[in-house]
Amino acid sequence: MPVLIRPLTPYVYLMACDLIIRNGTIVDGTGGEPFVGDVAISAGIIVGIGSVEDEASREIDATGLLVTPGFIDLHTHYDGQAIWSDRLTPSSAHGVTTAVMGNCGVGFAPCRAEDHETLVDVMAGVEDIPGVVMADGLPWTWETFPEFLDALDVRARDIDVAAFLPHSPLRVYVMGQRGVDREPATAGDLELMSTLAAEAMTAGALGFASSQMMVHRSESGVPIPSYGAAYAEYEAIARGIKAAGGGLLQFVPDLVTDAYEPVLKTVFDVAADVGLPVTFTLVIGNAGDPQFIDALEIVDKANAAGGQISAQIFPRPIGLVLSLELSGNPFILYPSYQELAALPLAERVAEMRKPAVRERILNDAPTAEGHPLMLAAQAFDWMFPMGDPPNYEPEPGDSIAQRARARGVSPLEEAYDRLLDDDGRAMLLVAMANFRGGSLDTVAELIRRRDVVLGLGDGGAHYGMICDASFPTYVMTHWVRDRPAGRMSVAEAVRELTSVPAGVVGLGDRGRIALGFKADLNVIDHDALRLRRPVVAHDLPSGGRRLDQTADGYVLTVVSGEVIAECGVPTAARPGKLVRGRQPAPV
């Protein structure tokens, strides 16, 4: 990688520095050319860049290493994990230093005591968080959204968090059972929603999040409370946000159906009428009509008329991880498999290897009940064995369907056999979306658009289905270094992971290596950067299971000037804070 050596005027300090990172290749987050220099930090702030003559309590030689701003993930669900844990992994293991939660309009506040079970039911269904984990992990020391922020504020953790006001809890808090049943909001309901939205913004919410996605259902199988909300409801909430100084609207449209266009129009029109920015989830179908193109045309028109709209896109396939140890596999809904599902893994594998059991399961049929996402558990044309390191852009010929044809067996047989690999610990990746035509070429085109931002790591959710919070490492490896074609420069990739998301969400104090900016940094051995295969961990409350994923190559991750991880090993530092509201850029 060509490196510009830029002599900079040393910054003169009035106090000793806490940390100086010397001789690193600085990728400052603006998209400009990398250059070799030092970064000096004092009191959690960047106070010097270039040739720093002062000394510090600790100095790091970063010769040959990248020095980047900390990464920002706009779409996470750490609403629970940020309460019960002091580490927000997997995100913090992949260079993320700020995580925004409350997305998709689901969360735990505001909430009255009598509605705890309702919100747990919603989170269990939408985000695959076991109810027992939430029952054990949530103290429910809050009722209002400001009180929830206070609970976050007193918790020490490794990285910063910020939060949206979520739509479904707000609706249930205002309307009770009528909100759960998705009845239309009355004039009185709308007035109270507006007031509470303003209260949340004043307390420190970054904005408001909602979902209009059909597959977002509670564990009981019903659509979430926000589904089908009318224009008047969005407008009332938006006006409350505007009255309190403004904030970002985040939502998930139903892009997998033909109903996405009126939903986009509703939220975009509200944003235009009230004067608020919007970010929404954009999904690329693997096949069929390219609805994402039509959605982006709507974005183009809205932005041309003065809107501030960004589409959030995930930089690898959106999908599921299937395994005998996880929430789903191709046989999870088969009664003959369910008879074995409660057995310890080793015993289950031993049973499944018996010819009679194998034949019985393969000749069974699924029940009609189950999580909507399990419909993809037999999408064999888009299903691939997951190796180590995992390949998130596999060749179409490696699919379970193609492998089955090569063996002369059915896809069910091939999937069955692959699940038993590695003594039953093997994993299968289902690329449900963003893998159009069997590649990421369409993603490559879209991630360079000005109205598209990277996100959708979903950390803190889908514990037994996905592990997408590792996407920053994937961007820095696959999209910068390893992909045969269509790669990004390191400066472009870092910009898309730092200053761009910071700008979308209004966090002007971070996302760049510049004087006065927050000292959130990564020091990366780019040549050694490597994404590991996900593993199953049992470290949630009540011993709950989740997917975790680590990486090699992160030499340091720094939050507010404190080193939170060194060579992949967490330190005792817990400098992470709650970010209350949008933050201005340093003067």
Image (cartoon, rainbow, N blue to C red):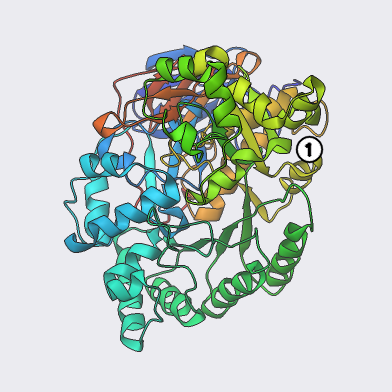
Q: Quadrant of residue 362?
A: top right
Query: Residue 215, how many percent across, how many down?
Result: 53, 56
Q: Quadrant of the N terminus?
A: top right
Compared to residue 118, the image places residue 398 above or below, namely above
Judge the density around disc 1: few (<14), some (14-19), many (≥20) Cα neighbours within 10 Å.
many
Query: Residue 441, how many percent across, how many down?
Result: 80, 40
545 and 579: which one is in front? 545
Is residue 24 rendered to the left or right of residue 196? right
Query: Residue 365, how many percent across, how many down?
Result: 57, 41
Picture residue at 56% right of the left edge, 40% below the top: 498
Q: Quadrant of residue 254?
A: bottom right
Query: Residue 233, how many percent across, how many down?
Result: 44, 78
Mark 1 highlights which residue? 438
356 and 491: which one is in front? 356
Is residue 445 rendered to the left or right of residue 345? right
Q: Is residue 120 among the parts visible in the rendering?
A: yes
Q: Is residue 53 among the parts visible in the rendering?
A: no
Q: Amino acid at mark 1?
A: Gly
Picture residue at 33% right of the left edge, 67% below the top: 170
Picture residue at 71% right of the left edge, 37% below the top: 382
Is residue 27 rendered to the left or right of residue 209? right
140 and 477: which one is in front? 140
